Image (cartoon, grey):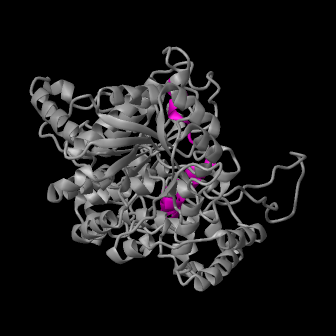
Amino acid sequence: MSAILSADDLNDFISPGVACIKPVETLPLQKPQDNPYEVTTEDKLPAENLAPAQISLTDCLACSGCVTSAEAVLVSLQSHTEVLNALDSQPSIPIASLLESTSDGKTDGGSAGLQDGKIFVASVSPQVRASVAATYGISERKAGWMIEQLLSGPDGLRTGGAHGNGFTWVVDTNAMREACLVIGAEEVMNSGLVAEDQQASTGDGALSTQPKKPILTSACPGWICYAEKTHPHVLPHLSRLKSPQALTGTMLKTVLSRRLHISPDRIWHVALMPCFDKKLEASRSELTDISWQPPSPLHPRSTPPVRDVDCVITARELFMLANTRGIRFTWRPKPCSQEQAFTAMRAALSHGANFWNGGEFYGTPEYNSLHLLSRYFDQYPSDAEKVVLSIKGGLSASMLPDGSEKNVRRSVDACLAMLEGKKKLDIFECARVDPKTPIETTVGVLATYVKEGKLGGISLSEVKAETIRRAHKIHPICSVEVELSLWSTDILNNGVAATCAELGIPVVAYSPLGRGFLTGEIKQKSDLPEGDFRHHMPRFQEDVFDKNLKLVEELQKLAKKKNCTGAQLALAWVKQLSGTEGMPVIIPIPGATTEGRVVENMKDVTLDKADMDEINEILGKAEVHGGRYPAHLAALSDG
């Protein structure tokens, strides 16, 4: 890493040459006289305070002198703080709404009623992935997944901030690196076809479109800056090709602005690069839309130039980005071994827990729950017929519900491909409801898979009673997954449980242990692992934690009388509700990674009427403080 913009040492730079073209020290001007003919005997007129001198990145790049005095400013202009400020400045534009409003190819995003907001995109260099991989001792592919989850995943940056923003797209710069190699080779080959006099600088000092031989090239902006300041005679030999960083920025802003019919300044692009000098490159005036965007009513030339790359951060600043939001970069704990997982799965099946719930987005891209299941059925093929397999899917690349026909088919086909025919996909579950796509459309697509025999049934998750009825009219719904526990009883009062009972639809109760809180093992917030997602959940915040703990303490007293654990009591309460008058069949799905935890959860605890009455009395007195999810996620939980 170059030290030009190192935050550790702001005093090392190219030796000072010519005096700064915008010196910070300025002499005060004389105050204008009201009377030009007035004579004064004072040695000098009183001076007025002047506005501070303004030094931009472009000024410093154009200067051959020392820029040490401005380096701190340069670093602060492109940092992890600037990324967070950008994410908090405006809401993210919903891509589905934008595509729908501009589908005619004529309407632009502004006239379609989407004047506010930006599209946030990020590009990641392979060097940054390698740096993260080396830091944590993992593969580069897994490091790339970790970066993507931080920037765009539901447990990353989206868990905080003013608008719950994350990056809609996270792209790899390797594609543009390959393009640079191809175009660079073409540049060299074509240079031999251009006359020598056309290769030289033009009369006004501007460089021609073709460099002189030999062609010099470098993706290092520090070297370019050095050549410009100290060896200008080599400039006619420099390649005219943009670096992979700049080329990626141009690609993103041209393609997205034209495809979505919005101005490029509504696309905010951050690049993750290995070197601080890349910040200098991103600030060059040549790397703006002036080079590729002709003036238009949507983007008149009078507006300020739009940079191809709005901000550059390094791997070190990526970690700072996570730390500032209170997210451990490796917030997902290291998964248990395959052997341990298989042991727990076998234990669950032997104890009668044959309803298995997974998702195409649970785990890493290279090893999610479907990959694990595929390997399990390789080792235990006879278990395939014993298990009822329900898999959630249907999220977009930005981890938002996408119930469009195209994405539903992509998701189902991907799930089937990962199972490799070793187990039938008994139930495909829509992970939340897409507010932009009618539920009838989503269920209609899934119904074709059921008819073709590729799916056994269709399930919904986190839905309203009305949505259940609408979906059930298109095709019978075989289950509805919702949160139900001793501190999440919403479905008992909002019509969901009653509707499912009426239509004969079982309820799959997720988080029946209140994300572990009802076990009694979490006695203070510091008991949560560093970087755990629950740090962002409203019910686990400092101001309400102790208040919510009172409910657990009362339930623990009853558990002690029943000679069971808090977890067993909580699960017994959910099971006891199942099939009672006015209630549907309820299937709790607690998570477990060890055989011991499976055995504990499966212990049969009987609750009589007196026990249920006592629990109801406890629930009636105890107030649960905080919502189930942060606001931006809660909006997706009532589809």
The quarter of the rendered structure image containing the N terminus is bottom left
| Residue 53 image point, x, y percent | 62, 56
User: Residue at coordinates 64% horizontally, 77% vertically from top-left?
Assistant: 555
State left or right for residue 482 relative to residue 610: left
In this view of the protein, which residue sits in the foreground, 617 or 190? Answer: 617
State left or right for residue 639 relative to residue 428: right
What secondary structure predominates along the stretch shown in magenta? helix
User: Residue at coordinates 86% horizontally, 45% vertically from top-left?
Assistant: 36
User: Residue at coordinates 54% horizontally, 25% vertically from top-left?
Assistant: 299
Answer above or below: position of 564 versus 410.
below
> Where is residue 187, by image quadrant?
top left
| Residue 363 image point, x, y percent | 34, 57
So how many labels did they put on this image? 0
Answer above or below: position of 118 versus 146.
above
In this view of the protein, which residue sits in the foreground, 516 or 266? Answer: 516
In this view of the protein, which residue sits in the foreground, 492 or 163? Answer: 492
Stretch of the chain drawn in magenta: 70-99
Q: Can residue 257 be seen here?
A: no
State left or right for residue 632 relative to residue 366: right
Q: Can residue 317 be seen here?
A: yes
| Residue 194 image point, x, y percent | 14, 23
> Where is residue 16, by image quadrant?
bottom left
The quarter of the rendered structure image containing the C terminus is top right
Asked whether residue 96 is drawn in magenta, I would say: yes
Answer above or below: position of 471 versus 418.
above
| Residue 353 image point, x, y percent | 37, 61
Asked whether residue 427 is drawn in magenta, I would say: no
